[in-house]
Image: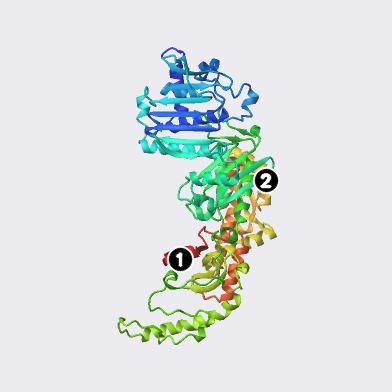
Amino acid sequence: MSRIQLLSPRLANQIAAGEVVERPANIVKELVENALDAGATRIEIDAEQGGVKLLRIRDDGHGIAQDDLPLALSRHATSKITTLDDLEAVASLGFRGEALASISSVTRLTLTSHAHDSDEAWAVEAEGRDMATHISPAAHPVGTTVEVRDLFFNTPARRKFLRTEKTEFSHLEETVKRLALSRYDVAFTLRHNGRTIHQLRPAERGIEKEKRVASLLSAEFIDSSVHIDAEAAGLQLQGWVGLPTFSRSQADMQYFFVNGRVVRDKLVVHAIKQAYRDVLYHGRQPAFVLYLWLDPKLVDVNVHPTKHEVRFRDGRLVHDFLFRTLHQALGSVRPQDTVASAPAYALNAAAEPVSGVAAGEFQQQERLNWQVPVSNLQDLNRPAYQPAYAPAFNTAPAASAVAGQLDTLRQMNQPLSAAMPAGDADMPPLGFAIAQLHGIYILAQNAQGMVIVDMHAAHERITYERLKQAVDEQGVASQPLLVPVTLAVSEREADTAEQFAAEFLQLGVELARMGPENIVVRRIPVLLQQAEVPQLITDMLGDLLEHGTSDRILAHRNELLATMACHGSVRANRRLSIPEMNALLRDMEATERSGQCNHGRPTWTQLSMAELDKLFLRGR
């Protein structure tokens, strides 16, 4: 066996680079975070061939002093922490002091900097096996430029793992998006092969921040999201969460920041999924841009070299705060909040009506007098207009079918005329019903245009929310088991069951510890008498161990209530009167999460007058 020996600086840095540098996007992340820590207000990123051939990051931060340049490319050299107390309350994005040394070991790196309190600029490079630094004078404004060329030029085996130029740049662009979303006060410019991809100005006001989000994600996300700004127990949550109707097939619009640092945390993902559970269609992913602010001492960012993972001191508090805030925000959305923001269409406009070709009229087309009641319309068996070129058809069957529909129109006319308001000022968000289509959909008219409602899905959500409210008001009814269930669990799970015995009892479950690795279940909720008790308790203990909280019982209860609501809701092909349809619309406007049924399907949609005019080419 070989003798123990000290690794060379370059080899040690290359080993460290395996944890930090996987592709050009990782280099951009580390260098831009350094620029942000340096107080930069403008950052420019230039890339060639997806960042493999060239990466140049320029900032206008406070720069690096000449005497500190040799240390800048050394391992474990940083200006951001000095003591253990600093490590326990990290306020900067970078702090490990490994990025520049790791990058310079697998690329040709040149760092040029002009400190704000100096009259000169200097450049530094690392060369040779021992990575000796070489400093030379340079011309540069105040700030720093890091130029990285030929990624993995000295480690060809790792270069083979790089993907195509397009793929590498897509990862790089995604990294820049995250950084741009983390700091609205900084201007970002991204260029690839000489072409400007993003040029973002600083955003200070709320509307400017929304414009940045819209430009980086999509304008539809901002239009279909709820703004959040909540604070409790020393935690603050800000940002935007997409409505369930704006769900995605993949998790490509999920951005979560802790104290300005983008993170991917299991606890956070679990809390957000819980908040969307009742309103998101199965298999779909929510979209969100959220910012959590808390005392740096309450979160440990020194968990992984890439700093993507964090560990909260009180994970249960954070989980409950995120879930409660998002759950309330999504539950408070009403149809009036999501109705299209297009200007209301004047139903009784005083202006002179448009006529002729501009209104969609054709030659020889007779104008219909809409003010005349349906009962006074002429005989449908004798159409008002027969073109000279029209062939002779046998109209008897068709006429009898239309005549049958006339009775329905007559019945619908009376309630509708009484329900319609005099003007748009009295129009509710979902408007007033005018017809039922195929016994499935309700057609309603509101100030913006036409609303189409899936009556079964809408009634299902209303019934479901009422059932949940009734059960919550009465409390969780539980019953003792005729034969208590004994479970063999691990010692950690038994400790957890003993620790959270009071919480289990509030949920209607009575547990007792019978030994080091045994617990007994004596009481369960009445609603869950058909559930698999051992599996339910085991899953709950697993949740408590991982997240500090569990909602398995609530989830099972809601599944049962959802099934009851589904079977107790109005079915398709049931004819509703106009008052019944309007009553359903008013209930939707007052019910939480009425935009989706229990299974996450949308319950209604809006067609604006502009969209309807576009379908019929009006005004063209």
Task: Determine contact: label 1, label 2, CB under 8 Å.
Answer: no
Label 2 amino acid? Ala
Of badges 1 and 2, nearer the viewer stands 1
SS for callout 1: helix
Give the residue at mark 1: 613
The amino acid sitting under disc 1 is: Asp
The vertical placement of 471 against 516, above or below, is: below
Residue found at x 58% / y 69%: 584
- Which sits in the foreground, 451 or 369? 369
* Colour setup of the view: rainbow
Query: How far across and how far down the image is residue 573, in percent?
Result: 49, 73
The residue under the point 46% across, 32% down is 45
How many labels, in total?
2
Left/right of residue 161 with respect to residue 601 in the rendered view: left
- Residue 25 location, x and y as percent? 45, 33
Q: Nearer the viewer, residue 226 or 21?
A: 226
Within-10-Å neighbours for mark 2: few <14, some 14–19, many 20+ = some
Looking at marks 1 and 2 on the same chain, the residue that comes earlier in the sequence is marked by 2
Could you tell me which quadrant the N terminus lies in?
A: top left
| Badge 1 density bin: few <14, some 14–19, many ≥20, Cα 10 Å | some
Q: Is residue 148 left or right of residue 421?
A: left
| Residue 345 in view here | yes
In front of the other: 300 or 108: 108
Q: Residue at x 38, y 38 (%)?
A: 167
Which residue corresponds to mark 2? 501
Quadrant in the picture for residue 3: top left
CA–CA distance between discs 1 and 2?
62 Å
Which secondary structure lies at badge 2?
helix
Residue 419 coordinates in the image, percent (x, y): 60, 75
Q: Is residue 7 visible?
A: no
Quadrant of the image containing the C terminus: bottom left
